Image (tube, coloured by chain):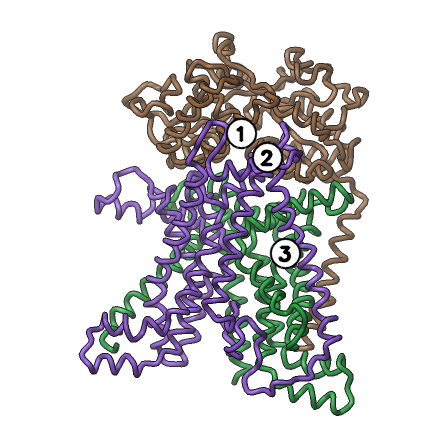
Chain colours: A green, B brown, C purple
Amino acid sequence: MKRARLPLGLSAVGLYFFLYAPLAVVVVFSFNAARHGVVWQGFTTDWYRRLLSDELALSAAKNTLLLGGFSTAIATVLGTLLAFGLSRSGLPGQRWALRLLQVPVFIPDIVFAAAMLLFYSLVRQWLGLFELGVSTMVMAHVTFQIPFVTIVVRARLAGLDPALEEAARDLGANAWQAFRCVTLPVILPGVLAAAMLAFTLSLDDFVVSFFTSGPGSATLPILIYSSVKRGVTPEINALATLIVLASLAATLSVVLLQRRRRA
Amino acid sequence: MRFLTLRLLPLVLCIGVLTTREVCAAEPRLNLFIWSEYIDPAVVAEFERRFTCKVVIDLYEDDGAMMAKLQAGGAALYDVVVPPDFRVPALIKLNLLAPLRGENLPNLKHLDPRFLRPAYDPEDRYTVPYQWGTVGLFVRRQADRPLPDSWAAVFDPARAWGPFVLLDAQRDLIGVALKYRQCSVNSADLGHLRDARDLLVAAKRRSVGFDGTVGGKNKVLAKLAAAAIVYSGEGVRGVVEDAETAYVIPREGSVIWVDRLAVLAKAPNRDLAEKFINFCLEPEIGARISNFTQFASPNLAARPFLKPDDLKNPAIYPPPEVLERLEMLEHLGSTARLYDEVWTQVKAR
Amino acid sequence: MLRSARGNSNLPGSVIAPLGCPTTTRRPPLRLALLATAPALLWLALFFVGPMLLILGTSFLSRGDVGELTRPFTLENYRRLVGFGVFGFESLYPLIILRSLALGGLTAILCVLAGLPLAFFIAGLPPRWKGAALTLVVIPFWTNLLIRTYAWQILLSPDGWISRIAVALGTVESGAALYPGAGAVLVAMVCDYLPFMVLPLYASVEKLDWTLAEAAADLGARAGQVFRHALLPQIRSGIAAGVILVFLPATGQFVIPDLLGGARTVLLGNAVQQQFGPGLDWPFGAAIAALGLATVLAGVWLYGRVTGGREEVGVV
């Protein structure tokens, strides 16, 4: 297979180019002076200045972070506990629970979003609960985050040496103490990785947020979608550039953190 | 690592506390649900100043999306909504609107009586007119051809004007297709509707897609399309931005519409909502809104404050011979299902 | 990264037992385990299973004149789905279903074709570069899907340089845009879902037993034959996992066809959005969604079969 090195390398470069072209074009066009259209009309940083004074964009950014923060916190706790509980073999209904966890991972966003919309409006009719807003968005996000958290933490738990916990139990710790003082510290990197993933999923989500949002609770993806629907504007390119930079920084810092821990 | 979590948790809690406080702040809030680019930000700012409140605006691009959001629970979240005329009966029937208290709307007297007491709201109990306008073609001029004067520019491939954008609004677009076939925009005839459907499906295949009125205008301005079906205001605003474009109402006729202001049934702040509506009916404010949107004002007393050029602009205030060819959309009851089905098929094929 | 934990392969779908640990484990005690799983399972029962059952139930209701949910209970929505509407027989919805499946399938196939060279390339890199190369594949996935999608609007617009090259090559007529259309949708789909394919492919390519390939080559097999007979069987489960990971979400995509198809290329996802949004026909939308749900359940079952219950999905 050594012969295939060159064509393989070339096609890989092409594919990387293909993956990064959309990101590059957004960054480039955020500095384009043209208001409409895609023809280059000179360099400007004007769109960034306008963006930073745009109240809608700022409130959308705040909503996005709030939504991501709260839902990630809840989902991480629930998902980690679930993974911990499921790590014990021989639970009744365990197979079903594991199968159930895969459904939200695979389900198209739109089906889940429609189901949540229906659920919220029927419950509201019967019980008067669940007015659409940040809280309904948080509940929906937690729901699709839990399975991802559980799966990631489970992978970490699988590598855990049970002797550790048993030693703690033999030394007189109760089950909770053993979890708190032995298991949790060991799986913490996994939990953090899961939280990172959950947070990104929340930031990335448009469809579910779109269906469960209320007045003034628009997030950045919702803002981007409605702007794109009206015709791409340079401010949105600037916003997208900032988001791309933020996710780039986050990914790199996670990678570096992991590398340092390994070293 | 434990360090990190211990530090992060209070931070998250702080954010939570801060935002709840913001919501609970004493300043009253008006939640306005309105078409995009349909109100002058300066007018909103003035309202905020005068009534010391905060206006939170949510936007929609088509009236179907607006209906969907209200039905999915938006009725308890928003205070004021701006539905088009033909949607009003459904909103009333679904108990989504709160009756207006006449004593809170003294400015009603400024309105042109032509726009008061419509058939769907005979006592102006639920709605008052906001802006009115038409549906037409926004086109880029071509040096070697006269401006199109027929919907054939969209529906007849032989007389096509160039790549075009269809308006993403069910009743308006089906209405236009029916007009091209010399039928009423409210036809309940299965044959007419099937015909309109086929016209639209064929047109869709040649088009650059569906867009809201603002999106359509922007695509023509960005030269991504040569023509777009838009509402009059966007057409006129487009011409202001780029003189190489024009807004025309084709000779087969078109849709004329009135958007209404209404208060939602479970509006969190009904008093402020009525203040807002009364505010919009003030002659000077009404004129500023129309000067911004470039739609026509139903406010007689606002005329002195309107830009004189706009008043003379036939694209905004069509002359009587054009008005004759325009038709209003009506609420259709059970026939609405046929229109829904036509729309779904047009969108999906 | 797609993590696979090898467990007791005699028990497909069973719990993952950690490598080399004693079969009986006291951790955690049954009561604590149940207590730990309860909150999340209750949450999922309320906010996931509940809504899904509601979708199923609603799909048998009717739509009122102004879009409200009403009785009678009916199979009408499913009849419409297979083609019997108010205007007589319509192949429309069966077509949408087929079109969605076809687009999902095509996306998956193109992702396999693009993912294989990339996976082999990364697996062949010196170990210290592998991590970086994989991270490079994953980074676009971490950035917002909407951004990546609308960027293609810019890339493929008539004034953009891709269109100009296409016009110069004579593949498109001048002035015609590459977007909106099915082609643009497909390009963006492949771009967006490629990472989902590369990760499982890489995981199985990494484990390849190259001695088989060498033996085949020694016996005089050509490169194509080596690949087909010695390598492909070994990575088949990786391919299958990737195909399912790409196919299911791609089939239900709604944003990409909406933004790049000019709202013209309607797929299952758009049909659901249309009915729950402007169409105001929730029962019919629920019927379409129920179909999507059924597809996913079948996919989950298949995924369990393909990976023998040993593998779990997880992008880390």
Label 1 secondary element: helix
Q: Amino acid at mark 1?
A: Asp
Residue marked by disc 2: C280
Q: Is residue B232 above or below residue A243?
A: above
For disc 1, the neighbor class at 10 Å (few under 14, some 14 to 19, many from 20) is some
Label 2 secondary element: loop
Q: CA distance from mark 1 to mark 3?
A: 32 Å
The answer to whether one can see residue C89 in this image is: yes
Tags 2 and 1 in contact by the CB under 8 Å rule? yes
The answer to whether one can see residue A198 in this image is: no
Mark 2 belongs to which subunit?
C
Q: Quadrant of residue C181?
A: top left
Q: Amino acid at mark 3?
A: His
Mark 1 belongs to which subunit?
B
Q: At which x and y percent is residue C243?
A: 42, 61
For disc 2, the neighbor class at 10 Å (few under 14, some 14 to 19, many from 20) is many
Mark 3 belongs to which subunit?
A
Q: At which x and y percent is residue B132?
A: 58, 20
Label 3 secondary element: helix
- Left or right for B232, reference C197: right
Q: Is residue A197 above or below residue C85?
A: below
Looking at the picture, tell me which residue is in the foreground, B252 or A115: A115
Residue marked by disc 1: B340
Residue marked by disc 3: A141
User: Residue shown at 51%/11% (left/top)?
Assistant: B323
User: Residue shown at 65%/76% (left/top)?
Assistant: A90
Q: Is residue A22 above or below residue B309?
A: below
- Left or right for C288, reference A195: left
Q: Are marks 1 and 3 on the same chain?
A: no
Q: CA distance from mark 2 to mark 3?
A: 24 Å
Q: At which x and y percent is residue C70?
A: 66, 34
